[in-house]
Each structure stands twice: as structure tokens, then as C-alpha cells.
Image (cartoon, rainbow, N blue to C red):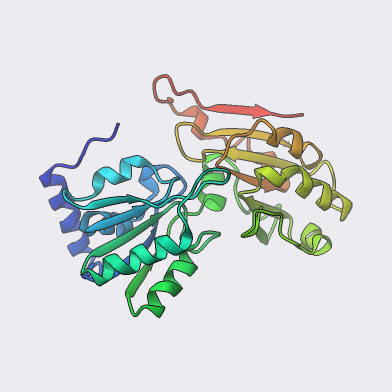
Amino acid sequence: MAIPLRSAERTAIARLAEGLSLPKFAKSSVWLAGAGPGDPGLITVLGLHALAGADAVLYDALINPALLELVRPGADLIFAGKRRGQKSCRQADISATLVGLACAGKRVLRLKGGDPFVFGRGAEEALALTRAGITFRIVPGVTAGIGGLAYAGIPLTTRDTNHSVTFITGHDASGHLPQFDWQALAHATPVLVAYMALAHAEEIAERLIAAGRAPHTPAAIVSAASTERQSRQVTTLSRLGHAARTAQPPAIIVIGENVSLANELDWLTTLPPPQDSPRQTTSVL
């Protein structure tokens, strides 16, 4: 359990913000900030500054709870998370709350997992704010497709394997698999990263193979990336659907030759794990 910050630590954060000439978090404004994929240490300095100065924080389901201990005493904490298959907050209500709090003179922080503009609803919320005349700032975060894979020992690019990457989402606004051009997707880039794709992993693999992607292409599923619960399944494209049946959300899927480096670069499992929280690394053949 996280320990709330003492006044001396809050003073240190304020001095850091001053030393770096970080922007002032003004009243009646909203900051849309990314919290990173899970490890609280991956939040940016600007995100830390926002946490310390906010009057109200609307936070997602996937952020690390330890970050909420950095909020100043007296600030309002409002859950505004969305999880597939679970009762979730309506996007219209979240946007309306952001507008309402800002109109009430609050410094409002919208804290989102990963990066607010990468397969999140940050753009929708920003549009609602600008149409309401609310000043806002975007604070980018470390997205799971980069930081989460790094924690699993899977480099997004290497000079020997790829010079381009494709990012996709595993479902559209209705929850269905998007209508991709599968021929183009199968051949566009050597590495493919899929967000929120567990439910459709088998269909994604089948469509890519039917479009010409080699069945033996290395693939991996990283669950709860960069957290104490992180697990990694290394497999192949043809076995991706099988692996997805036992993987736990939230998860990121990567397909490409870079995955073959995962065992050699598995730096996280060489570190002493937290007591009673062993990290898992498995292969599905």
C-alpha cells in the first residue's frame, strides 16, 4: 500500500516544478494526463506536477492506485474508468463532469492509463472541453505498446528486424473487431502491436495468416505490463488464439520477429521480485 506524501516531499515536488519552469496549473482548467502502463515510476514529471496541484482528479480503472496518494489533501478523487464487459462510466458523463468542475473554478486532472491520445478517449474529452470554452493541456504518457513491451524484454524496433511499426486496436466503439484492410495490415510492417485485442486475438491471427502472414511468426501477449502482476506468453501467430484464452486483461499483443529477442532481453525477471509476487514468463508452443 502506498504511503501518502509528507509535506516535505510535497515541497520537493513544488521545487522540482519551479526548477524546471513547469507550467502553472491554473484554476478553471483541465489537464489530460497519461499515467503510463502501470509502474507508477513511469509517470512523467509534468504528470507528477499535475497530481500535486489538482483540486479534482478523474482517474481511470487501469492507473496504479499508488499515484492517487500523490494528490494533495482535500482534493476530490472521482473514479471514471471503463473496462470491457463491466459496468462503466458513460463517456458523455465523464466529459460533462470535466466541464462542470472546470466551470466551478477547479484545477481538474483527468488521469488516464498509458497515453491519453493513444487508443484512449482523450481526443473526445479534449473536443468536449474546447467546445465548452475550457482551457486544457495534454500531458503525454508512456503508452503500453512501447513501455509495456520494454518491460517484457521486447524492443519495439531493432535495426536487424524492422524499420516500421503498426499499432491497431482490437475493437471499435461497438466492441467489434474493426474492418481492417487485412491484406495491407498483414504486409505493411514487420511488427504489429494490438491494444485491447484479447477477445479477438484468434480472429486477428486467422485473418493475418489468411492474408499471407507466416503462421510461425513470433508473437507475445503481455498482461498487466510493468506491474507486479506482469506475465508474458511467448508463442507464434498460429497459436496466438490458444494463448489468449488463458491471458488476463489488460494485455498488449505484439507480432513480429522482435519477439524472438524476449528471452535474451528479459531483464525484469532478473530483478528480485516483491515478496509473494513472483513474475511469470511462459512460452506457448
Count of marks, rendered view: 0
On the picture, is 177 further left or further right than 5? right
The percent position of residue 194, horizontal first and vertical second, equals 65, 51
Residue 48 lies, in percent from the top left, at 29, 54
Asked if one can make out residue 87 in the rendered structure from this viewpoint, the answer is yes
Q: Residue at horizontal 22%, vertical 54%?
A: 52
Residue 284 x %, y %? 72, 29
Q: Quadrant of residue 185?
A: bottom right
Q: Position of residue 158 (x, y in %)?
A: 64, 53
| Residue that protrudes farthest toward the top in the picture | 276
Q: Is residue 43 left or right of residue 106?
A: right
Q: If the image is split into quadrants, where does the C terminus sit?
A: top right
Q: Is residue 40 left or right of residue 225?
A: left
Who's the residue at 22% across and 68% down the image? 104
Reply above or below: 138 against 254: below
Q: Judge from the rendering whether residue 202 lies leftward or rightward of residue 111; answer left or right.
A: right
Q: Note whether residue 263 is visible.
A: no
Q: Residue at x 11, y 46 (%)?
A: 7
Task: Identify whether 269 is placed above or below 85.
Answer: above
Which one is in front, 37 or 91?
91
The one of 222 and 126 positioned closer to us in this rendering: 126
Q: Give the residue displayed 56% in from the left and 27% down from the top.
A: 280
Image vertical order of residue 273 relative to residue 175, above or below: above
- The quarter of the rendered structure image containing the N terminus is top left
Q: Is residue 30 above or below residue 112?
A: below
Please tell me in which quadrant of the rendered image residue 100 appears. bottom left
